Image (tube, rainbow, N blue to C red):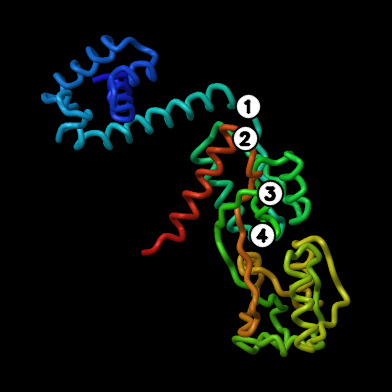
Amino acid sequence: MELRQIEYFLAVCQARNFTRAAQACNVTQPALTKSLKLLEFELGGELIDRQAKPMRLTDLGELLVEKFRKLHDLKNNIAAQASLFSNMDSSTHTIGIVNTIGEEKLFQLSQSIQLKFPCIALSISMLPQQALEEKVLEGCLELAIFVDKPNQSRWCKKSPLFTETFVLALPEHHALSDKKTITTSDLHNVNYIRRDHCEMNDIVDAYFEHQGIKLNTQLSTDQEGFASQMIEAGLGVSIMPKALGKKMSTTREISDFPFQRTLSLFRLSDRILTKPAQLIQDLILQQETAIHAPA
């Protein structure tokens, strides 16, 4: 059995006509017919009922067609990866990731791509939300992971990856650390460290103002690592995504905080991805689907 024979059979299945199938495969009809007859001989039975009008598959053909399609797809995938390995082993592909993502997610992504596609040299560009959006729009980045917002749907194709809640990160011996769960009212007049690159700042500011809650914001930074260090040093508290808060020694749930964020994989709607970008995109989506699949 040869892969070429399987390709001819699948072409006939799609075209339901030997002449059109031969044209699609760029061979003569006699050559295609002869090849299929050899395949049927090897399998011990006919795959196609040639007397039926319109043409249809036999029971054996119906049994094997999906298996042949999977084998054909596997062959194409192997060929694509082999080509990538031989032609792109020295190339570097850049993916943009919002700089407020948790380190655990970042490491999982990097490791998965390295293990699956060792021929792709991956460069990760960690940038604020607005900078990533601009780079995708300008065509500088094929793929980027950042926070899903309503006004992005006009220009991009997005694939949701995961949704997470927010927590309060605070010093180990802070007065609020004695509480297992806190409310937003507990934050009134608390020393607060503002994370300048947080995508939710405007929304959260408006919410606290509406609730009459005043944060004593005397420190702010655009560096997530520095914000964490200031919190651990006892200089204040900060609200941050749950994944980002995992590296903090002390965090608490905020029971009445009404916000969460969804991180999605973005690309321009009308942009055709290069092969490395397509492979990376497919891997990310498969990985997140497996993580969040029902048990």
Q: Earlier in the sequence, mark 4 or mark 3?
A: 4
Residue closest to the far right: 218
Q: Quadrant of residue 142?
A: top right
Q: Label 4: how many residues lie within 10 Å, few (<14), some (14-19) or many (20+)?
A: many
Q: How far is mark 1 from mark 4, CA to CA? A: 31 Å
Q: How far is mark 3 from mark 1, CA to CA? A: 32 Å
Task: Tell me which amino acid carries mark 4.
Answer: Val
Q: Earlier in the sequence, mark 4 or mark 2?
A: 2
Give the structural element (helix, strand or loop) at label 4: strand
Task: Tell me which amino acid carries mark 3.
Answer: Trp
- Which mark is drawn over residue 121? 2
Q: How far is mark 2 from mark 1, CA to CA? A: 7 Å
Which mark is nearer the camera, 4 or 3?
3
User: Residue drawn at (46%, 55%), measured in percent from left and top?
Assistant: 289
Q: How far is mark 4 from mark 3, CA to CA? A: 15 Å
User: Residue drawn at (64%, 29%), measured in percent from left and top?
Assistant: 91
Q: Quadrant of residue 255?
A: bottom right
Residue bearing the label numbered 3: 155
User: Residue drawn at (55%, 52%), measured in percent from left and top?
Assistant: 108
User: Residue drawn at (37%, 16%), measured in percent from left and top?
Assistant: 23
Q: Quadrant of residue 248?
A: bottom right
Q: Earlier in the sequence, mark 1 or mark 4?
A: 1
Q: Is residue 216 above or below residue 265?
A: below
* Dot 2 and dot 1 residues touching (CB under 8 Å): yes
Q: How far is mark 2 from mark 3, CA to CA? A: 28 Å
Q: Of 273 and 85, which appears nearest the observer?
A: 273
Give the structural element (helix, strand or loop) at label 3: loop
Q: Is residue 56 left or right of residue 295?
A: left
Q: Is residue 159 above or below residue 239?
A: above
Q: Label 2: how many residues lie within 10 Å, few (<14), some (14-19) or many (20+)?
A: some
- Which mark is drawn over residue 147? 4
